[in-house]
Image (spheres, helix red, strand yellow):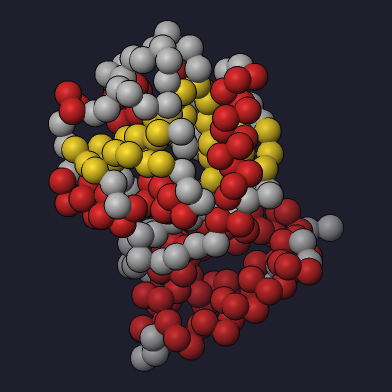
Amino acid sequence: MKIVFIGAGNVAVHLATALNEKGFDICQVFSRTQASAKHLADKIKSEYTTELSQVRKDVDVYIYSVSDNALTGIISLFQNPDTLHIHTSGSIPMSVFAGAAENYGVLYPLQTFSKVRAVDFSEIPVFIEAANRQSEEVITKMAQELTAKIHFTDSESRKKLHLSAVFACNFVNHMYEIGSELVKDAGFDFEVLRPLVEETYKKVQVLSPFEAQTGPAVRNDSNVIEKHLDLLAGKRNLDELYKFISEDIYSVHKS
């Protein structure tokens, strides 16, 4: 099975590397940026190109790991009825391939990826959707080499999964960033918050997020909340953010 990766961003680097380690033949990487294309190609000992006209057509699978904004436009440039087309996006429907390909589907790994940090793909849940049985069998075979945590879903459910991941990962990480900024006002760095962050993570391994919630908002401790709001005055819109989140926590937990 010969595979071409369209894109060389965070997801592409990790997915291509994992597939390469399992023996899949990734024969080419395409990216509009030479540095990223070369970085991934060197990592998996593949060829690369930055020219659309040079993307190989004698392959079995195209895997698209590009931004959602770029995906729709680039798919139409690779019309090849004998090739399986797969994208890895959480929010783009599978129907984006309709009219451009006969065999297509989605392989969505539910994880946050950064090029500088290794991940264990065997621990990552992967969500599959396919246009037909033949496409599903090939995508499933690929996924089974990476992880046992395989789920089958449709585009609407996958979009909701992606939304949940934004809250559970991207927004949480932004809260870490705000916490890092605020703890500096106290004369310390983020290191003093790490034990707290780690315990928060450990608690949701054994408790539901609802059961694990603590803090002034869940108690509706207005005295503490007002003092915090005073400290946040003039810091972007952090006081409004604090107030909104606190009100939402209380609305969920009030008896």
- Position of residue 167 relative to residue 207, above or below, is above
- Could you tell whether 109 is left or right of 47 in the image? right
Observer able to see residue 47 = yes
- Could you tell whether 92 is left or right of 43 in the image? right
What residue lies at 53% left-to-right and 36% top-to-bottom?
107
The foreground one among 95 and 157 is: 95
Total number of numbered discs in the rendering: 0
Q: Position of residue 7 (x, y in %)?
A: 31, 39
Residue 143, by quadrant, is top right
The foreground one among 29 and 248 is: 29
The residue most toward the top is 99
Q: Position of residue 114 (x, y in %)?
A: 39, 59
Q: Position of residue 167 (x, y in %)?
A: 55, 51
- Position of residue 22 relative to residue 230, above or below, is above
Q: Position of residue 221 (x, y in %)?
A: 67, 73
What residue lies at 67% left-to-right and 43% top-to-bottom?
150
What residue lies at 27% left-to-right and 18% top-to-bottom?
77
Q: Say which quadrant the C terminus sits in.
A: bottom right
The foreground one among 183 and 121 is: 121
